Amino acid sequence: MYVTGPDGRHYLKHHLLDMGSTFGSNNLMPHMPMDRFAIEGGEVRFADLAVAGKLEEGGQYQCRLLDEKGKPLGSPRVLEETRLEIEGELAPERYYGYELRTQRPGQQSWSKYTRVYFYKWEEGRHQLVRVEREE
């Protein structure tokens, strides 16, 4: 059977996942994380590859500020967009990070984390240094 276009993507996704395929459930969805991180204009921006690839419809993103050792600073926030404003009261010349998770419509729990770390040189000047994903 050959199915192409949007119907083919829909068929493949549902066929693999509905059958409990080891490939689909263990490889396809977990490897469609947030990616393409950038820091622009005082914001961390990213792409949700599952949404960009039309495998999933949006959802929410949970973010939590981290210190240089990966320890949480404050409570998590929930976002609807793939960008978050870097909090302004951070001391300069230090490393920080954000822990990000996704929650798709109909899901009860948050995904495994993706952490993006950056260095704050001074107010308004940040540098992306590392991205880390929970296995």
Image: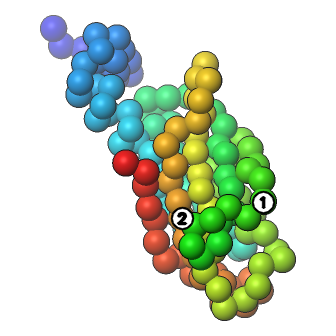
Percent coordinates x, y for residue 133 in the rendering: 43, 55
Could you say whether the residue bearing mark 1 is in a helix, strand or loop? loop
Near-viewer residue (30 or 47)? 30
Q: Amino acid at mark 2?
A: Val
Residue at the (30%, 15%) spot, across then down:
20
Residue 116: which numbered mark, if any?
A: 2
Percent coordinates x, y for residue 77 in the rendering: 76, 49
Residue 74: which numbered mark, if any?
A: 1
Q: Is residue 64 left or right of residue 56?
A: right
Could you say whether the residue bearing mark 2 is in a helix, strand or loop? strand
Residue at the (60%, 80%) spot, across then down:
95
Residue 88 placement: quadrant? bottom right
Position of residue 63 relative to residue 117, above or below, is above
Percent coordinates x, y for residue 79 in the rendering: 73, 45
Q: Quadrant of the N terminus?
A: top left
Residue 120 placement: quadrant? bottom right
Tell me which numbered mark, 1 or 2, is placed earlier along the sequence: 1
Position of residue 96 relative to residue 123, above or below, is above
Q: Is residue 59 left or right of residue 55?
A: right
Task: Bin the neighbour count of mark 1 within 10 Å (Cα to Cα): few under 14, some 14-19, many 20 and up.
Answer: few
Residue at the (68%, 61%) spot, across then down:
72
Question: Is residue 119 among what the camera can see?
Answer: yes
Residue at the (72%, 89%) spot, across then down:
92
Percent coordinates x, y for residue 114 in the rendering: 50, 53
Position of residue 60 relative to residue 100, above or below, is above
Proximity of marks 1 and 2: CB atoms separated by less than 8 Å:
no
How far apart marks 1 and 2 lie (CA) works out to: 17 Å
Residue 102: which numbered mark, if any?
A: none
Q: Amino acid at mark 1?
A: Gly
Q: Is residue 41 left or right of residue 6?
A: right
